[in-house]
Amino acid sequence: MSMWIIAAVAALAGLVVMTHAALVGWRGWLDLRRLEIEGRRETAAPSSGARIEIADLRERIRKLEAIAAGVDL
């Protein structure tokens, strides 16, 4: 009788260990997918408003560099 109880407890412990390992793997996979999705957002094409802002900033930088070099615009 006690042998059956020991076997049942061992089987239950093994099931708990396997379930925990599967859960840790699942969470790791979800984290990996989350990082991939965030990476795609960062590499997405900028909107037209952002492009206009970047062009404006580049123009300002060009003007400041010209002023620093002593060139009249």
Image: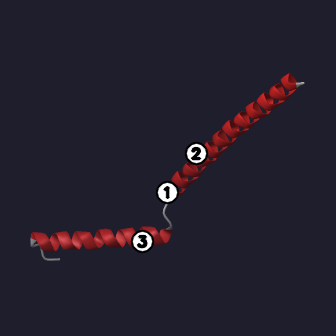
Which of the marked residues, 3 or 2, is nearer the chain's N terminus? 2
Residue 10's x, y, as percent?
A: 77, 28
Say what amino acid the circle numbered 2 marks: Leu
Say what amino acid the circle numbered 1 marks: Glu
**Outermost right residue:** 1
The crowd level at tag 1 (other Cα within 10 Å; few <14, some 14-19, many 20+) is: few
- Please name the residue that numbered disc 2 is placed on: 32
Q: Nearer the viewer, mark 1 or mark 2?
A: 2
Residue 52's x, y, as percent?
A: 42, 71
Per the model, the C-alpha gap separating discs 1 and 2 is 16 Å
Q: Nearer the viewer, mark 3 or mark 2?
A: 2
Say what amino acid the circle numbered 3 marks: Ile
Which disc, if any, is residue 67?
Answer: none
Which disc, if any, is residue 42?
Answer: 1
- Please name the residue that numbered disc 3 is placed on: 52
For residue 21, side relative to residue 11 (left or right): left
**Outermost left residue:** 70
Q: Are marks 1 and 3 in contact (CB under 8 Å)?
A: no
Per the model, the C-alpha gap separating discs 1 and 3 is 18 Å
Q: Nearer the viewer, residue 1 or 57?
A: 1
Q: Nearer the viewer, residue 7 or 23?
A: 7
Q: Nearer the viewer, mark 1 or mark 3?
A: 1
Which residue is at a point 67% across and 36% down the rendered structure image?
A: 21
Q: Nearer the viewer, residue 34 or 58?
A: 34
For residue 52, side relative to residue 41 (left or right): left
